[in-house]
Amino acid sequence: MTSPSASGRGGAITAPHHLATEAGLAILARGGNAIEATIAAGAVLAVVYPHMNAIGGDAFFTVAEASGACFGLDGAGPSAAVCTPEAYRARGFQAIPKRGPWAANTVAGMVSVWGAAYEHSRSRWGGTLSWAELLAPATKLAGDGFAANAGQGAAMRGHWAQLSQSETFVKNFAPGGRIPEKGDTLRQTALAESLALLAHEGANGFYRGELGRRIAAGLQREGSPLDAGDLARFECRRVAQPAVRYRAGTLHNLPPPTVGITSLTLLGILDRFDLSGLEPMSAEFVHLHAEAAKLAHALRDRHLGDPDFVDVPVHRMLAPATLDALAARIDRTRAAPFDDGPLPGDTVWFGVADAQGRSVSAIQSLCWEYGSGVMAGDTGIVWHNRGHGYTFEPGRANTLAPGKRPSHTLNAPTWFGDDGSRIVFGTMGGEAQPQISAAVLTRAMDLGMPLADALAAPRWVLGRAWGDQSPTTLKLERRFPEATATGLRALGHDVEWFDEWSDYMGHAGVIRIGADGAMDVGSDPRSDGAAGAL
């Protein structure tokens, strides 16, 4: 079954689109494992949520064994070999454009992550389903079509002046120049052909096969700096994960260049406070979260970059003494100043657990809505614009250099209880992801709220999520009591109201696995998603 919440023991999945949940649940019902279900669901999301993610984007997985051992798959694609500040300035750019061919400047790592996960499934988890079987639901939806949601058209209308510059974009997503309305059938026949070729060649084909050659040639025709050599050199990385203690367990997340360390810092600070007696919509509860986020963001802005190029002091940032000192700086009676530095981002998060107690926390992204707006030629693949966040300023952690990975808003957390329990959770939401995830986790864990209530409760974001929002205001969904806003203003916060159910507050999901193996799963009502369990 699929619904906003579900429970079972034979496997669970939560995804921000119900068709992805259905695809993953069907794989679990066939006896497939958590990785196989993740690939099937992720491929469907890359078709039915094209404004949020695509196979021309990046991905990160946290893969966990039944024992609790875990590792990360890092799909941060590096910049093209020709990408230097001088190359951009020679073309009249004083900064990297947000969209257009020269915003399509980093390799897409998502398919490589799928491939590495698939190999782990086959070699270590006894996976038996073929690559083609896992991509079949997505391929069929791309070819036959699906009902567009309201967000796809809204995102397109909001950026039409830039997106419509690409004839191939218009051909694929708005045939005849007509932006799809909610309920319209959206077919992506070129993408279906590419998915069929990917199913035949395997993940390697995206980078070094016939599909990769078509992608590279198409990007070059569109004017992107990426070429076949950039694709051919790429492999995703299997990475060890940093961790912090949170309550009676350990929280794992992805290392730099992702904001996994920001999420860990934020929750590591909150672990120094007793939240259990607070009201979930009180000014005090929100204030503590916002102040912890300010401190975590400040460390992010100072240090986050590609550790191949810059020193990111992860162990020092997450050391208990550092977290103690940061927590001591929080004034429970007054808001500290806040000057948030921008990190671009928008994405989808989803999670899967199987009957054997293995799990995947997964996140996929195009960065901004429809990414760069550039299609890889006639492949039907829209390319991301994660690299538009680089700076030309020398000496910064995220300064552009050839082959350098950009700072990433993506992260995929998992909490492991000392008693063998587990919480797989995450969200989309650009650079606000750590805040949104922390709100959901603390409401569920510290305040004891049922998962559905923790996901549905009004949320806040301090600073930006993505796009052109104010960088410093504390944004509240309008379902908060007026007294909460009044209390926050009295503490010194600049409060801004957002819609009652705002996409900017994320599309989150949670799977909670008890020490006895029982699974509870929830999906965010702000999304088009569903929770499923067997």
Image: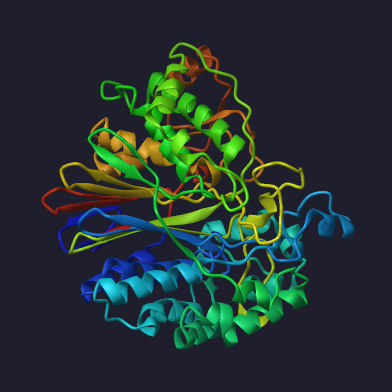
Residue 322 position (above or below residue 39): above
Quadrant containing the C terminus in the rendered view = bottom left
Percent position of residue 454, x then y: 32, 39
Is residue 44 visible in the rendered structure shown here?
no
For the rendered model, the colour scheme is rainbow
Report the number of numbered marks. 0
Percent position of residue 485, x then y: 48, 21
Is residue 52 visible in the rendered structure shown here?
yes
Percent position of residue 24, x then y: 32, 68
Quadrant containing the N terminus in the rendered view = bottom left
Percent position of residue 354, x then y: 23, 64
- Residue at 47%, 63% in the rendered image: 237
Identity of the residue furthest to the left in this view: 516
Residue 59 position (above or below residue 431): below
- Residue at 46%, 49% in the rendered image: 255
Residue 478 position (above or below residue 308): above
- Residue at 39%, 84% in the rendered image: 132
- Residue at 19%, 53% in the rendered image: 519
Q: Nearer the viewer, residue 63 or 172?
A: 63
Q: Is residue 218 left or right of residue 25?
A: right
